Amino acid sequence: MIVAIDGPSGAGKSTVAKAAAKRLGFSCLDTGAMYRAIAWKALADGVSFDDVEALGAIARDNEIEFGHVEGDPVPRRVFISGTEVTDAIRTSEIDRAVGPVAAVPAVREALVAQQQRIGRAGDYVVEGRDIGTVVFPEAPVKVFLTASAEERATRRVKQNEERHVGSTNYEEVLADIKKRDEIDSSRAASPLKPAEDAVHLDSTGKTIEEIISFICLRAEQ
Ligand code: C5P
């Protein structure tokens, strides 16, 4: 069983997906972390973002795996070919690099295949941009989660402060979010758009609890 949660950066998908998975007793899969890991690897290997062949090869040749911190059922640790990149993929540098990397069709093809392999192995809440449209179009529960760009920037700054990674400058974060929205929704390969059968939820002014309860109720029906 797959619960698909899509939406723009910072709409609260991660928090909601992790909490809903915990409550439902499902695993959860953060597909954004996978695109981030490929961007990290490309930067680490000095691969140019114009070199689509090399970017595709990175996505095909490197397995991305998730791991647990002891006592926490949510798989928060991220590894690419055995190297842990949990914190390294949350920097502003990766925030900026990931959009162009995720726009490369060969990268998407390789990661979608990895995501389908992972998700088909069990019950998953999967969060991303194209889960309900491309990765798991057959998912029985699909949510498209949004919030205003300003609200998303405020939340991202708070999250970065807590994690001690990424920018904590509101204007800079807001500009990055708007730029990423633009790249994600205008790219030719799997642009960000809701699946026709997705339920739209705007999290502006709603509590996280309201959203989690709604999703769990749908999944249990
Ligand atoms: O969710 P997160 O903000 O970590 O995702 C990082 C980036 O990865 C997004 O801005 C988007 O460009 C890309 N992405 C994607 N498809 C997904 C998940 C993420 O293109 N399913």
Image: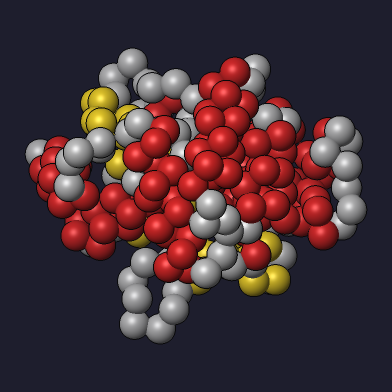
Q: Position of residue 27 (x, y in %)?
A: 35, 59
In this view of the protein, which residue sits in the foreground, 56 or 46?
46
Q: Residue at horizontal 45%, vertical 54%?
A: 157
Q: Position of residue 218 (x, y in %)?
A: 15, 38
For the C terminus, the quadrant is top left
Q: Is residue 152 left or right of residue 102?
A: left
Residue 214 sits in which quadrant?
Answer: top left
Color scheme of the displayed model: secondary structure
Q: Is residue 32 visible?
A: yes
Q: Position of residue 84 (x, y in %)?
A: 64, 71
Q: Is residue 113 visible?
A: no
- In the rendered view, would you say 201 is above or below 214? above
In this view of the protein, which residue sits in the foreground, 154 or 29?
154
Q: Is residue 52 left or right of residue 109?
A: right
Q: Is residue 19 left or right of residue 169?
A: left
Q: Residue at horizontal 44%, vertical 51%?
A: 156
- The total of numbered circles placed on residues is 0
Q: Residue at horizontal 53%, vertical 52%?
A: 169
Q: Position of residue 131 (x, y in %)?
A: 44, 34
Q: Residue at horizontal 20%, vertical 38%?
A: 205
In this view of the protein, which residue sits in the foreground, 149 or 119?
149
Residue 91 sits in which quadrant?
Answer: bottom right
Q: Is residue 187 left or right of residue 212?
A: right
